[in-house]
């Protein structure tokens, strides 16, 4: 901001200088205040938690190899992230691509919902667990039965967990009763930050 030239007559110059110096002082104070406000807003934006959510799914039938009954293995089938709702998360990577990953530097508390429709032989129980960075979370285990006529069963689980920067939550599956491979017709995994 430039100060206008004074057109006051010589006898009033001291008063004019006083006015000009005070205008300059007020201008400097205002500029410093605006700079402080901008810096504070920038710090607030850095500290503010960003939204985080994901929706991963597939409707394509695939097979999960089973070698031991009751042992949970990575589903490891890539799904599609819904780009219209997914924010600050990406699909998980190997060794289990059936999951989502925190793509920020922030640690968040997440609500996770996961399900799949599948079967592992007539009247055999099938299971689902969540894993954090490949480590199974036993408390998330859910089981259901496939029908006697080859109908699929639905397994569903949900959990609240902390996801740090780069952490992944993935889906594990098991044939509880036999070594028959699992046939999964569809799966869904949604994640939403609650804090």
Image: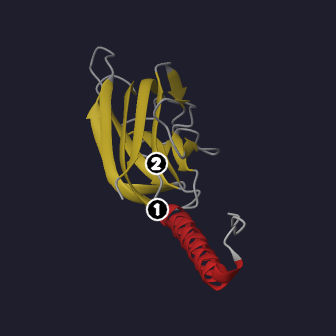
Q: Quadrant of the N terminus?
A: bottom right
Tell me whether circle 2 and circle 1 mark residues in contact (CB < 8 Å): no
The foreground one among 143 and 165 is 165
- Relative side of 86 to 156, left or right: right
Q: Nearer the viewer, residue 159 or 25?
A: 25
| Residue 145 percent across, percent down from the top left | 27, 30
41 or 57: which is nearer to us?
A: 41
Q: What is the count of numbered marks?
A: 2
Circle 1 residue: 48
Q: Residue furthest bottom?
A: 14
The relative height of residue 8 versus residue 71 in the rendered view (above or below) is: below
* Crowd tier of the residue under label 1, counting other residues whose Cα lies within 10 Å: few below 14, some 14–19, many 20 or above: few
Query: Is residue 19 found left or right of 48 in the rendered image?
Result: right
Q: In which quadrant is the C terminus drawn? A: bottom left
Circle 2 SS class: loop
The residue carrying mark 2 is 52
Give x and y (percent) for residue 150: 33, 16
When asked about the image quadrant of residue 165, the answer is bottom right
100 or 27: which is nearer to us?
A: 27
In this rendering, does residue 176 appear at all? no
Q: Residue shown at 55%/67% (left/top)? A: 34
Residue at 44% across, 40% down: 173
Q: Looking at the image, which residue is at 41% across and 32% down?
A: 188
């Amino acid at each position: 901001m430039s100060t206008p030239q004074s057109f006051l007559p010589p006898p009033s110059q001291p008063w004019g200088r006083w006015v000009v110096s005070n205008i300059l002082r007020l201008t400097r104070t205002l500029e410093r205040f605006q700079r402080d406000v901008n810096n504070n807003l920038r710090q607030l934006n850095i500290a503010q938690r960003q939204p985080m959510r994901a929706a991963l799914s597939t409707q394509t039938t695939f097979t999960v190899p089973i070698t031991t009954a009751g042992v949970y293995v990575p589903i490891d089938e890539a799904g599609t992230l819904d780009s219209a709702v997914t924010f600050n998360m990406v699909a998980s990577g190997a060794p289990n691509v059936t999951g989502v990953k925190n793509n920020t530097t922030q640690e968040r508390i997440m609500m996770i919902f996961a399900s799949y429709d599948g079967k592992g032989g007539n009247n055999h129980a099938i299971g689902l667990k969540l894993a954090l960075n490949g480590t199974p979370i036993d408390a998330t285990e859910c089981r259901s039965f496939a029908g006697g006529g080859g109908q699929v069963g639905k397994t569903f689980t949900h959990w609240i967990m902390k996801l740090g920067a780069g952490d992944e939550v993935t889906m594990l599956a098991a044939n509880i009763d036999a070594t028959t491979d699992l046939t999964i017709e569809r799966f869904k995994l949604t994640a939403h930050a609650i804090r």
